[in-house]
Amino acid sequence: MKNINEGKGLFAPVVVFTRNIIGKKRFNQLRGKAIALHSQVITEFCKSIGADAKQRQGLIRLAKKNGERLGFLA
């Protein structure tokens, strides 16, 4: 099954190329680690500015939408 985001976004060609080189399983492991790390950064940022859980969740959703638009989820 083909990813609906494949080929869309500025970084999509790099993402697809990398996935083809290192393999889908390893790529998904790295992607999962990157997403978890980014979520931790957002959480720490929210703690530092006093944002509540709802605001934090909104920032994480925004980050996902931006990632889709830029092609990181290709």
Image (spheres, rainbow, N blue to C red):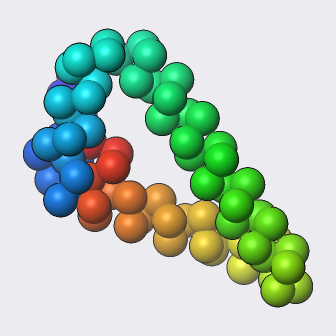
Does residue 52 appear in this view?
no
Kindly identify the residue that appears in the image at 50 percent across and 65 percent down: 63
Q: Toward which corner of the image does residue 55 lie, by quadrant?
A: bottom right
Nearest the eye: 6 or 1: 6
* Quarter occupied by the N terminus: top left
Horizontal placement of 25 versus 23: left or right? right
| Residue 29 seen in the current view | yes
Residue occupying image coordinates x 63% and y 74%: 58
User: In this orientation, which residue lies closer to the viewer: 32 or 61?
Assistant: 32
Left or right: 27 in relation to 60: left
Quarter location, residue 14? top left
What's the residue at 20%, 47% (across, down)? 12
In the rendered view, would you say 32 is above or below 42?
above
Percent x, y of residue 5: 22, 46
Q: Is residue 70 above or below residue 56?
A: above
Q: Give 52 or 71, whichever is nearer the viewer.
A: 71
Counting from the top left corner in percent of width and height, residue 2 is at 18, 28
* Residue 30 x/y as whole percent: 50, 29
Q: Is residue 48 left or right of residue 72?
A: right
